[in-house]
Image: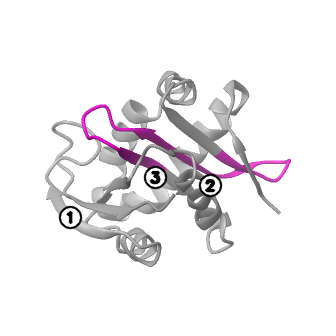
């Protein structure tokens, strides 16, 4: 049984490991192990994770069963879009998928931003499983980008939004 809790500094290494394993399992078939390895190194360093954990307008959650971290989610208020929270990461370890962990992480994140009216995310166009998951949660496509996650990533993504009811 996994419990959702706020991440802390001691979670940095388990989260980094979870992200590396999950990204390779998800994206190696799409983008190849070399590109994924490079992205994992640049996006999921210990320093980057700790910065997100400590972000003032963010919420960084983990799914913890007392032995391991089975999933993680990170969202933050947008610095540029009014009343909009952005879901930056929601990942469940491949061995823990289909157990409701992603749904539980999302349900908790959805309540963390009382000033937000919209929750927004980007998802790789080739990640059909994630697109289906977010559609089931009430997200709809509002736009597309050629650079998911960071400038010049070269990864095409769907931008999805969901209105938040408070």
Distance (Cα) linking label 3 and label 2: 22 Å
Residue 142: numbered disc: 1
Decide which of tag 1 and tag 3 comes sooner along the chain: 3
Callout 2 secondary element = helix
Q: Residues within 10 Å of mark 1 (few under 14, many from 20)?
A: few
Residue at image x 44%, y 60%? 164
- In the image, residue 48 lies at what x, y percent? 47, 26
Decide which of tag 1 and tag 2 comes sooner along the chain: 2
**Viewer-side label of 3, 2:** 2
Distance (Cα) linking label 1 and label 3: 25 Å
Q: Is residue 93 visible?
A: no
Magenta stretch contains residue 129:
no
Q: Is residue 106 left or right of residue 149?
A: right
Magenta stretch contains residue 80:
yes
Q: Which residues are magenta?
A: 62-89
Q: Is residue 103 left or right of residue 30?
A: right
Residue 113: numbered disc: none
- In the image, residue 124 lies at what x, y percent? 29, 60
Residue at image x 35%, y 40%? 39
- In the image, residue 74 lies at what x, y percent? 51, 43
Residue 23: numbered disc: 3
Residue at image x 77%, y 48%? 68
Instruction: Mark 3 and mark 2 in contact? Answer it, CB < 8 Å.
Output: no
Callout 1 secondary element = strand
Q: Which residue is mark 2?
A: 108
**Which of the 4 quarters of the picture holds residue 35?**
top left
Above or below 142: residue 32: above
Instruction: Mark 1 and mark 3 in contact? Answer it, CB < 8 Å.
Output: no
Q: Residues within 10 Å of mark 2 (few under 14, many from 20)?
A: some
């Amino acid at each position: 049984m996994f419990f959702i809790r706020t991440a802390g500094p001691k979670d940095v290494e388990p989260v980094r490991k979870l992200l590396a394993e999950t990204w390779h399992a998800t994206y190696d078939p799409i983008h190849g192990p070399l590109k994924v390895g490079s992205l994992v190194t640049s996006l999921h360093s210990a320093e980057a994770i700790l910065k997100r954990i400590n972000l003032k307008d963010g919420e960084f959650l983990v799914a913890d069963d007392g032995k391991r971290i089975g999933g993680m989610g990170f969202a933050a208020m947008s610095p540029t879009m009014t009343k909009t929270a952005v879901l930056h990461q929601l990942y469940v370890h491949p061995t823990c998928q289909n157990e409701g962990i992603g749904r539980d992480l999302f349900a908790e994140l959805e309540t963390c931003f009382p000033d937000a009216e919209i929750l927004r995310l980007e998802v790789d166009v080739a990640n059909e499983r994630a697109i289906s998951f977010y559609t089931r949660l009430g997200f709809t496509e509002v736009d597309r980008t050629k650079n998911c996650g960071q400038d010049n990533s070269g990864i095409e993504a769907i931008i999805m939004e969901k209105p938040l009811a408070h």
